[in-house]
Image: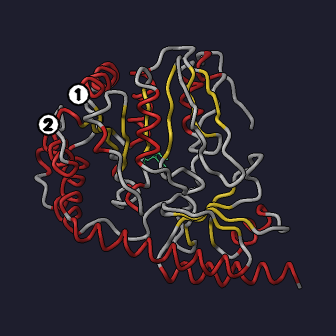
Amino acid sequence: MDLIKSKYWSNRIKDNEAYVPGEQINEDTYIKLNANENPYPPSKNAQNAIQQMDKSKLRLYPDFGCHKLRTEIAKYYNIKTDEVFVGNGSDEVLAFSFLAFFNPGDYICSPNVTYSFYIVYASFFNLRYKPIPLDADFNIVLNDLFIDNGGLIIANPNALTGKIVSINFIENILKKNINSLIIIDEAYIDFGGDSAAGLIKKYPNLLIIQTFSKSRSLAGLRIGFALGNKDLIEGLNRVKNSINSYTLDSIAIVGAAAALKDKNYFKLITNKIIDTREKISRKLKDLGFIVTDSKANFIFISYPGINAKRIYMLLKERKILVRYFEVSGIDNFLRVSIGTNEQMEYFFKSIKEIIENFKG
Ligand SMILES: *Cc1c(COP(=O)(O)O)cnc(C)c1O
């Protein structure tokens, strides 16, 4: 990467390698399966609530404590409002957590195949990053993990692989590490997993982070949240109120609360995505692909003997965008977000032709 350096830059940004999101090509000619966005529109309730807002009220600052939205989230998870923190996307909530709960020099542990933003935060906030190797099938093995200087973060289901660990597995880690903070990033939990939210009452060292970007189809509105013991939530508030007291805007607050109440639509679209995921996974396996057992809205796939980067480029020529990571250990895999049934049929037809061309 070419770094343009300015003499006015702080050391913090000079040395930092920032996160690179999936390409955002704003062209409707592409089938976009590269950022785990939801292929379905957000709930009509949310769209209407935003439409009907009194826009003249935008002259006022938003509700400082986001009380209504936090109360809705608390109701949904059967916890208290003061056990909920909301932020401008879960990326922001994650960044605040790293600031609130770790000291420079602390070790942040996480599986070595995961959401790469964790590594960016660790370096940006002067923490040390300690990757924990997965086994050959991308399973997380932490049986004896003991953290005595820092914390652990697990995406569950895991980013990239889609593989999930059980609540029992999480509870064992919590018990063994009661003096260290354990963060569970549940960005994809609604696509076939069980949230560990029920454990926050029992474990003061558990922080759960979720987002409206994936299962609630509101990536553009930027809403994320954390669930945890009220002292942890207070810690996040201390960070927020030292940086920007109003991270969520009035429109996002209204839209998110309305989306959360529309349980039927939420069920409908998540079930559709799960069905499509299972269908495409079976078809790709039949074709000879390795497909990890994903409980997320994406699949992680590899074709033995055919270079994944080549497949990525040939798909792009056919106007299909997927995600390829040039990272050792996973550089023959592609991450493919689950689109609509029609999109995935076109994806399958295209990738099948690509594979057959290679063989023929
Ligand atoms: C998408 C994603 C996020 C970020 O979500 P936003 O709420 O859109 O910031 C966080 N963690 C993981 C693992 C993700 O995949």
Crowd rating for badge 1 (residues with CA inside 10 Å; few <14, some 14–19, many 20+):
some
> Is residue 39 or residue 157 the one in the foreground?
157
Q: Is residue 62 left or right of residue 217?
A: left
Q: Tell me, yes or no, whether the two marked residues, 1 and 2, touch with CB atoms within 8 Å.
A: no
Which residue is identified by label 2?
60
How many numbered badges does the structure rendering display?
A: 2
Q: x, y (%) of residue 35? A: 53, 57
Q: Amino acid at mark 1?
A: Lys
Say which residue appears at 57% left-offset and 18% top-offset: 126
Going from the N terminus, do you reach mark 1 or mark 2 first?
Answer: 2
Q: CA distance from mark 1 to mark 2?
A: 28 Å
Say which residue appears at 57% left-offset and 37% top-offset: 143
> Is residue 28 or residue 197 the one in the foreground?
197
Q: Amino acid at mark 2?
A: Leu
Query: Does any portion of residue 16 appear in the rendered image?
Result: yes
Q: Quadrant of the C terminus?
A: bottom right
Say which residue appears at 43% left-offset and 22% top-offset: 99
Q: Quadrant of the N terminus?
A: top right
Q: Is residue 150 left or right of residue 46?
A: right
Q: Which type of secondary structure does the marked residue at label 1 adopt?
A: helix
Callout in the foreground (1, 2): 1
Does residue 216 lie above or below 348 as drawn?
Answer: above
Q: x, y (%) of residue 133? A: 68, 39
Which label number is shown at residue 99?
Answer: none
Query: Which image quarter: residue 191?
Result: bottom left
Q: Is mark 2 within 8 Å of ligand 1?
A: no
Which label number is shown at residue 230?
Answer: 1
> Is residue 325 or residue 102 the one in the foreground?
102
Query: Does any portion of residue 61 appear in the rendered image?
Result: no
Q: Is mark 1 within 8 Å of ligand 1?
A: no
> Is residue 100 or residue 151 the one in the foreground?
151
